[in-house]
Image (tube, rainbow, N blue to C red):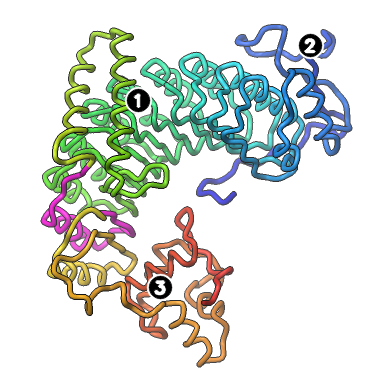
Amino acid sequence: MPNDYERDSVSAPQSSDETLYCEAEAPVAVEKEKPAQESSETDLEIEDTEKFFTTGQKELYLEACKLVGVVPVSYFIRNMEESYVNLNHHGLGPNGTKAIAIALVSNTTVLTLELADNCIMPEGILSLVEMLQENYYLQEINVSDNDLGLKGARILSEFLQNNTSSLFSLQLSGNNFKEESAELFCQALSNNYRIKSLDLSHNQFCEKAGEYLGQMLAINVGLQSLDLSWNHLCIRGVVALCSGLRSNVSLKKLDLSMNSFGNEGAAALGEVLRLNSYLTCLDLSSNNVTSDGLSKISRALELNESLKVLKVVFTRAGGRTASDACWMAGRMRSEMDKWVGDRQTDRQGDGCLQRNLEGRHRLCFDGNLFLNPISMDGALLLILSIKRNPKSKMEDIDISHVLVSEQFVKILDGVCAIHPQLDVIYKSVQALSAKKTPFTWTNPVKLIQSYADQNKISILDFFRSLNPSGELMMPVGEFRKAMIQQNKVPINRYQVRELIKKLGEKTGMVDFSFIRME
């Protein structure tokens, strides 16, 4: 699958006559040294045999299913030789996961494995970790929503401390991880340079977790993407995280949406943006940040030369749009009630419960449900900060809940003339007549096709001319800038935005090699 991270070089098999098979209990003569976590009755055992390296994958999996007493998953059998395998929501359980792990020990084709919502439990994650100690091809794993808890966190952290696999992307969303789990992960990641992308969203990290994360980020030199959305970091947690983020030299993408840190947290992040020259994407959505907090961010953006994407809107979860306030209110209520119950059970006695409970009630029940209640004046400060910074690399600003005026649009036009790579998404324009609405412009693809036909060239030749390298993929910002600055086809930024959607922008790149004419 395409991704933003450099994949570690893949190790070749150790020898042509060394392969793998699995038994319930391994012969003593060939037993390998295992981490202290494991007993002599290991889940996955390895011996020399050649046939399973390139053939017999199906037979190996079926035998493993018999061994652990589960029904084989037909989808896995059909796709076990593909690079991407999606087993989300298959009800595997610990034993089903163990059978999958046994089959993957010798697999050399699967690069990305999705195992979300399978009730894997700590026993299942142990099987996966044992498999990763032998598999040098698997690069991305999603084990979100599997109720791993503290025991699972211990298993994973021990693996991360000694990770020699090719794994660089790990999704751990919604696994009931709390403060102690955060400490374990941060200790493991402090010296781990292999993990590039980490998703810890929808867990129960609070203020103390923010301290651990800040300490880790201050010394970690590998992590490039970190998702902490839908946690409970609040003001103190985000401020502590920012103290480490100031000196971080690797993190590029950070999602802090739905953490209720308000203007104080925004101010701390503003200080980070003044000093950090590596962060390129920052999501602050749904944190009760007002125009006052945004002004702190704006002042920092007058100096920042790295940030490309800034989001300060409603949270968009599960494919839902910002208007689904009722659904989100229910979801937040549920998460809050679960979190409060867990915190009362934990009886940590540090005062965090009362502070966060009050903050959550305000967020759920006041008139600014899930909003960053930013006015048009606050939004104006934001775009003017880009105008004042000739070295700004900002490409996308999402303030899609803000209603703006025609005067705002005129000012934005001037800013975009200086920074043609910039696109700002806002809600709508007050009192904008139907004749002026940007949604009535001619289809940009048809305009380009018309130009290509008139000049007897292909549409791909036109797009290729935009890229100095002649390739058919470009970063979004560079593509937007090239389209605005070219003088062959008259096109405005609204049409360019529509064109980027049609080209299927993913991971910050547009690919116009597969464009379909209408």
Q: Amino acid at mark 1?
A: Gln
Disc number lying in front (1 or 3): 3
| Mark 3 element type | helix
Sequence order check, earlier mark of 2 and 1: 2
Q: Whole-percent x and y of residue 212?
A: 35, 22
Q: Mark 3 to mark 2: distance in Å?
A: 62 Å
Q: Residue 181, located in which quarter of the rendered image?
A: top left
- What residue would you read off at disc 2? 25
The location of residue 407, given as percent across then percent down, is 12, 69
Q: Is residue 82 above or below residue 44?
A: below
Query: Counting other residues with Cα less than 10 Å from the Cα at mark 3, is it few (<14), some (14-19), or many (20 or more)?
Result: some
Q: Is residue 300 above or below residue 436?
A: above
Mark before the other along the chain sequence, 1 or 3: 1
- Please, what secondary structure does the residue beneath circle 1 have? helix
User: From the viewer's perspective, is the residue at label 3 or at label 2 nearer?
Assistant: 2
Magenta region, residue range: 371-399
Based on the picture, tell me whether residue 378 belongs to the magenta stretch: yes
The answer to whether the residue labelled 1 contacts the one labelled 3, judged by CB atoms less than 8 Å apart, is no
Out of 245 and 107, give the one closest to the viewer: 107
Image spot of residue 90 (x, y percent): 61, 32
Q: Which residue was labeled with disc 3?
A: 482
Identify which amino acid the numbered label 2 is placed on.
Glu
Can you identify the residue that label 1 sits on? Answer: 215
In the image, what residue occupies the spot 56% across and 80% down?
Answer: 461
Crowd around label 1: few <14 · some 14–19 · many ≥20 (10 Å): many
> Within 10 Å of the Cα at label 2, are there few (<14), some (14-19), or many (20+) other Cα atoms?
few
Q: Secondary structure at mark 2?
A: loop
- Dot 2 and dot 1 residues touching (CB under 8 Å): no
> Disc 3 marks which amino acid?
Ala
Left/right of residue 266 with respect to residue 343 in the rendered view: left
Residue 27 shown left or right of residue 380 in the figure: right
Residue 462's place in the image compared with 414, above or below, is below
